Image (cartoon, rainbow, N blue to C red):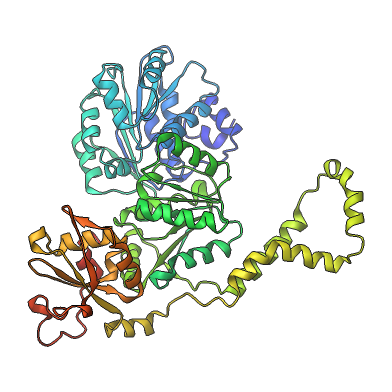
Amino acid sequence: MNEAFAGLGLSSSLTQAVAELGFTKPTAIQTEAIPTILSQQSDIVALAQTGTGKTAAFGLPILQMIDPELKTPQALILCPTRELCLQICNDLNVFSKFLPKITPVPVYGGASIQNQISALKRNAQIVVSTPGRLIDLISRKAIKLNDVRYLVLDEADEMLNMGFKEDIDRILSNVPEDKFTYLFSATMPKEVERIAVNYMQNPEQISVGGRNQGAGNIDHIYYTVHSKHRYEALKRVVDFNPSFFGIIFCRTRAETREVADKLIRDGYNSDALHGDLSQQQRDIVMNKFRSRQLQMLVATDVAARGIDVDDITHVIHYNLPDEPENYTHRSGRTARAGKFGISVSIINLKEVYRIKELEKIIGKKFQQGVLPSGFEVCEKQLFSLIEKIHDVEVNEKEIEPYLPQIYSMLNDISKEELIKRFVSDEFNRFLMYYKNSADLTVDQVSKRRESNKRGNFERFFVSVGRMDGMDKGHLLRFVCNAANIESSMIGKLDINHSFSFIEIDGEISDSFLESFKKVSHRGRMVKVEPANDRKDGNRGSKSSKGKKKKGKERSGKERSGKRW
């Protein structure tokens, strides 16, 4: 018997299953939540990061409290995504190995609802579901929730972020009032607090870590580079960590596809996960990632929600998320189950203030990193290769028939020469790529002085204005989406009746022009060209006439209109 878990009040059947899984010591959230749930005295609001053992924290006590003789749903577990739904149900099946009369059933979108209805009719006592599919089942009167005694809202903040607020309200209004509700969340925005106030009875608060706080076993590092060097910086981070296995978060679907395609072309085992994929395509990509056929997964925030994969070493923020709270969810994909992880942010100079904001939100200090030089990357890869060769397990039986011919073919080469040739063959890709490579890290102090001179912005004419429904907010969003750029790359906006002028970071001026070759607005092609090419290039709004204002650029926060 596992005495540590038995001390929490769990039965021998459950502690035996836990022991077989190799769990010897409960996590902090398990220590707090399991006895509280078993006491059946109050609702619970539990704040804990993903990867801290939350499924066992609510799953083990619920399994113990289920009546195996009652063949209707007694526990309902809501979660945001198909992947998390399946993961929770799989964990419950493992935990209930010695409880054969208890049946958990997963129901989720993207699969046959008829098959799921059939499964529910076969005496399902625990239902694990995504909100949308459960609403479908309720509408068809295919599920009865009259006997639900225990309701779990897992990753409640993510469900609300994904737009399930109305679905959750409807579900909560369909379950009995005399149930116990257990709300688990990584962050506590106001929407989650509203659920606690409206649908829970004096809930007990359990908090493992501070409000919105990141996990303690994650190192947070940021690298400051020019925007045009973002991809090269990403490769530098990956190549300097030969055992890299991680997720790369991008801001848009287009950027996700672009980065994944570049990585594949450069020889990395990579693939993209985004909202344009069908459920079947998504499953194929995720299965490859879980089995480590992929070294890295390039994903959007929405597509990556609910991913629960062990041993992820790194999370890379190719672009920081629009919503600061999403940083906690992203970084929580690594360092799961008490392991160590690294969260890397690649930013430009105008985004440094966002790092300061994140430090306040997660309660942790970020380390400013310096990207390794080409020489350092090559050195790291070389010794990793040598270590791998030294430790490789030789299959004597399988290789023995080929050894005589191999020895004969290599007989005229000395040991030293053989080592050099083998290393060169494996290593030449890195040597060629990083030969004469430049440093990518930007010196913040000197570049900030340069930026204050505003010499790095270029002014462009855009053939849309107020008559096209444009104000500064609409124009900013239109340009960012069309050119797939960040608002921090945009300076001053001057909007007139039929046209506008916009300042763009000079580093991306060529790609900015290129991106507008086939862009239309309200059925009319949009023309973009350098303002210097036009006679009216120096005209604009009142603020641009006369004497220029010195050193007064608006911050990225003011320009973007977002919560940053």
99 above or below 128?
above
The relative height of residue 448 versus residue 292 in the rendered view (above or below) is below
Q: Work out whether 268 lies above or below 173.
A: below
Q: Is residue 251 above or below residue 287?
A: below
Quadrant of the image for the C terminus? bottom left
User: In the figure, is residue 532 to the left or right of 242?
Assistant: left
Give 234 or 46, whichever is nearer the viewer: 234
Image label count:
0
Q: Quadrant of the N terminus?
A: top right
Left-right relation of 168 to 427: left
Residue 267 in percent (x, y) is at 58, 56
Q: Residue furthest bottom?
A: 547
Relative image position of residue 429 (x, y in whole percent): 64, 64
The x, y position of residue 438, in whole percent, is: 52, 77
Query: Residue sitting at 46 percent across and 75 percent down?
Result: 441
Q: Residue at x 34, y 62 (%)?
A: 358
Is residue 209 something that shows in the picture?
A: no
Q: Position of residue 17 (x, y in %)?
A: 56, 29
Seen from the viewer's position, the closer of residues 355 and 67 is 355
Quarter of the image for residue 159 reads top left
Q: What is the quadrant of residue 19 in the picture?
A: top right
